[in-house]
């Protein structure tokens, strides 16, 4: 594909774990197999969760595994900055555009009010679905009880998203998620807005990331469309679970790439185990990432969840 621009967008909230490494392997292979470019973006917007030094450690672990990137915080590029905390003016601009077009409203409801008035008995993945109370209170003379959040006034209708690994989904965002937050009351921009703005401005043609974010894609496609842009293509790499099928605990033994590095393992061993679990290689002993380029196709990648056999 000419002009392919992919990205890997880790959050510096801890060391690179096997799930992130599998996603990085997919993102790197997709970019290299299409002769395109790979962007590395550090997603440090959720400042309370950022762990000091983990951004550098993640980049270092990615390099140890054999990956490289064409643009990123440490290598520069024409679409920077590549660190989200340095991009807030871009998010502000996008929010202003949405606001001017009448797609947003301010909301000063407290958490307790939102739970009490939730329009659905079962909470959505980001908590209870907001009733839309503040959407009805408009006018310049409105006073707020606390610094308000900004929500997207989600339009009615179905959003269709197509994924290279997970298939297709048709999502009624209004009923599935409701009017979601674009900027929190404390001023932090929501991941949903930031990621769309960054992917659009960085010219990303295909978003590769973990399957845990597949359900966010419809919301993000919607934001992109409201900003007047064409959403990127999607490819959600399988969720990595532990060998007994349960969620990988981030601190569990052997989950961090660094653990294997410190044990003196050959990175090609870990790449081989990941590639095998993903469906990209047989049970081989050692593989360099570049040996997988010619073998890569999204059709081969398992939708998951997958587990990585690390026993010898
Ligand atoms: N920063 C997110 C993470 O590390 C990924 C966001 C994305 O790729 O859209 O889970």
Image (tube, helix red, strand yellow):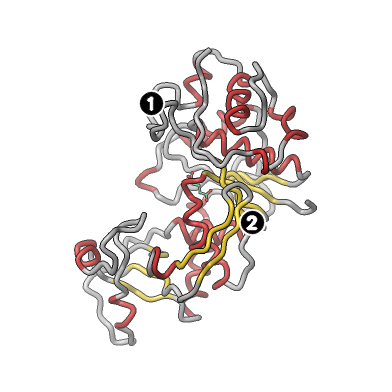
User: Could you classify mark 2 by the number of other residues whose Cα lies within 10 Å: few (under 14), some (14-19), or many (20 or more)?
Assistant: some
For label 1, being within 8 Å of ligand 1 is answered no
Q: How many numbered dots are placed on residues in this image? A: 2
x and y percentages locating residue 303 in the rendered image? 56, 42
- Which quadrant of the figure has residue 143? bottom left
Q: Which residue is mark 1?
A: 252
Q: State the residue in front, 308 or 136.
A: 308
| Label 2 secondary element | strand
Mark closer to the chain start, 2 or 1: 2
In-front residue for pair 81/5 = 5
Q: Position of residue 307 (x, y in %)?
A: 50, 29
Q: Position of residue 86 (x, y in %)?
A: 51, 53
- Which residue lies at the image location 19% right of the left edge and 62% below the top edge? 112
Residue 89 is tagged as none
Using the image, tell me which numbered label, if any, was put on residue 233.
Answer: 2
Residue under the point 42% across and 60% down:
189
Give the residue drawn at x 45%, y 56%. Answer: 191
Q: Is residue 14 above or below residue 198?
A: above
Q: Where, by quadrant of the figure, is residue 53 drawn?
A: top left
């Amino acid at each position: 594909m000419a002009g392919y621009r992919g990205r890997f967008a880790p959050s510096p909230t801890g060391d690179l774990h096997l799930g992130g490494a599998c996603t990085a392997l997919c993102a790197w292979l997709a970019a290299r197999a299409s002769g395109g470019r790979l962007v590395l973006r550090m997603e440090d917007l959720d400042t309370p969760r950022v762990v000091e030094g983990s951004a550098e450690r993640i980049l270092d672990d990615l390099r140890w595994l054999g990956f490289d990137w064409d643009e990123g915080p440490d290598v520069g590029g024409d679409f920077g900055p590549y660190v989200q905390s340095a991009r807030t003016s871009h998010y502000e601009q996008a929010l202003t555009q949405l606001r001017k077009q009448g797609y947003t409203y301010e909301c000063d409801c407290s958490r307790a009010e939102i739970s009490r008035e939730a329009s659905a008995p079962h909470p959505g993945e980001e908590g209870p679905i907001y009733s839309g109370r503040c959407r009805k209170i408009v006018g310049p003379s409105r006073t707020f009880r606390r610094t308000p959040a900004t929500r997207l006034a989600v339009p009615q209708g179905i959003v269709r998203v197509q994924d290279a690994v997970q298939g297709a989904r048709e999502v009624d965002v209004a009923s599935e998620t409701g009017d979601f937050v674009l900027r929190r009351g404390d001023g932090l921009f929501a991941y949903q807005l930031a990621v769309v703005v960054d992917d659009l401005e960085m010219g990303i043609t295909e978003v590769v990331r973990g399957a845990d974010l597949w359900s966010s894609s419809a919301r993000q496609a919607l934001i992109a469309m409201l900003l007047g842009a064409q959403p990127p293509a999607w490819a959600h790499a399988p969720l990595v679970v532990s060998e007994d099928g349960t969620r990988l605990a981030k601190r569990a033994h052997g989950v961090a790439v660094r653990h294997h590095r410190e044990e003196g393992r050959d990175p090609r061993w870990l790449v081989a185990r990941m590639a095998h679990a993903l469906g990209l290689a047989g049970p081989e002993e050692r593989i360099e990432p570049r040996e997988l380029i010619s073998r890569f196709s999204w059709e081969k990648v398992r939708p998951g969840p997958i587990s990585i056999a690390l026993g010898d």
